């Protein structure tokens, strides 16, 4: 078996073009553009790159996009002040505080301070709870992007044994809820899991989001399984790899996402989608 690639880059581009068309249509009707604000605290190089990509993507779609850069020694009150100001800014529909934040700041407190209708990350307890209850509103971008990729390829996960590796609030947990909502039988594996290879070997669908380069061995993959790699790791050589040993896994899987060019571009597209949805929701109430 040689896996078919799920081309996240192409799927994301198509989505971004649809969003751009929707924004163009709004502007032609004389309406304001949807607005996203990204808050970056400190100078973590990876976060800087992610934030730049998010900003550029929004601008390319004709959205209003602002980035607030705060110094690494900012206090929690400094960050809260920016969040409160953005909560009250009528031109802003979506607010994202890039994680991780420096350790003197409680990430959860900051996320919880974002107005629920502007929480385009879907990390706020209300949005997370709505997803858990199968009535999602704003949904975490990376898992939402994975679902869009599966839908694009018409891959039906209902009844499949899905194994999600990683239990983070950003990827693993909301991913499990998304797959459960699609009818998969979901297992979440994490650092305390006794027999990770055993779980992966039984899985029809594997989603890896652990942040460890090529940790998931190709030989663990069940023949014909679907492999979704959320990892993005830079090796000392400079090469970018995922959490899955790609070539060996691709030899056994039916479908696989590449790294780069798989899940990563989808995360940005879904952030834009969420910003548009937040705009439409706010405008409908205005
Ligand atoms: N850091 C890594 N991924 C994400 C994400 O999806 N949203 C935010 N806010 N921070 C992140």
Image (spheres, helix red, strand yellow):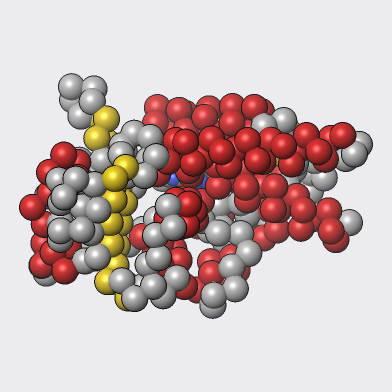
Q: Residue at x 55, y 47 (%)?
A: 270
Q: Is residue 276 left or right of residue 242?
A: right
Rendered location of residue 275, percent (x, y): 66, 47
Q: Is residue 176 visible?
A: no
Outermost residue toward the top in this view? 237
- In this view of the protein, which residue sits in the foreground, 15 or 66? 15
- Residue 84 on image: x %, y %: 71, 49
Vertically, is 124 above or below 100? below
Residue 37 lies in quadrant = top right
Give the image location of residue 135, x and y in percent.
Answer: 60, 73
279 is higher (above) or lower (below) than 8:
below
Along the viewing direction, whichever of 89 and 17 lies nearer the viewer: 17
Quadrant location of the C terminus in the rendered image: bottom right
Residue lying furthest front: 1
- The answer to whether residue 218 of the structure is visible from this angle is yes
Query: Where is residue 179 shown, x and y percent of the image?
Result: 41, 67
Report the side of 221 relative to 156 (left or right).
Answer: left
Q: Residue at x 63, y 50 (%)?
A: 274
Name the one closer to the observer, 112 or 62.
62
Of residues 62 and 254, the one drawn nearer to the viewer in this rendering? 254
Residue that extends furthest to the left in the rendered view of this protein: 219
Q: What residue is drawn where x is 44% and y is 58%?
A: 154
Residue at the location (27% across, 30% down)? 240
């Amino acid at each position: 078996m040689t896996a078919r690639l799920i081309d996240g880059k192409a799927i994301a581009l198509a989505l971004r073009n649809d969003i751009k068309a929707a924004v163009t249509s709004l502007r032609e009707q004389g309406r304001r553009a949807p607005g996203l604000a990204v808050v970056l605290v400190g100078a973590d190089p990876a976060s800087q790159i992610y934030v730049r990509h998010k900003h550029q993507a929004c601008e390319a779609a004709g959205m209003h996009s602002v980035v607030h850069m705060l110094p690494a020694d900012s206090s929690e009150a400094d960050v809260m002040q920016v969040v409160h100001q953005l909560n009250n800014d009528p031109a802003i529909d979506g607010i994202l505080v890039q994680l991780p934040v420096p350790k003197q700041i409680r990430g959860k407190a900051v996320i919880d301070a974002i107005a629920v209708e502007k929480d385009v990350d879907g990390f706020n307890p209300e949005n997370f709870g709505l997803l858990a209850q199968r009535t999602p509103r704003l949904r975490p971008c990376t898992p939402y992007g994975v679902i869009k990729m599966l839908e694009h390829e018409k891959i039906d996960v209902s009844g499949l044994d899905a194994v999600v590796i990683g239990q983070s609030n950003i990827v693993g947990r909301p991913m499990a809820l998304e797959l459960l909502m699609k009818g998969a039988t979901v297992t979440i594996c994490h650092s305390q899991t006794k027999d990770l290879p055993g779980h992966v070997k039984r899985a029809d669908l594997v989603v890896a989001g652990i942040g460890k380069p090529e940790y998931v061995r190709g030989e663990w993959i069940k023949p014909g399984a679907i492999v979704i790699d959320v990892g993005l790791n830079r090796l000392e050589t400079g090469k970018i790899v995922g959490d899955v040993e790609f070539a060996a896994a691709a030899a056994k899987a039916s479908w696989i996402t590449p790294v780069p060019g798989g899940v990563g571009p989808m995360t940005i597209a879904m952030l834009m989608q969420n910003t548009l949805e937040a705009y439409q929701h706010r405008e409908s109430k205005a």
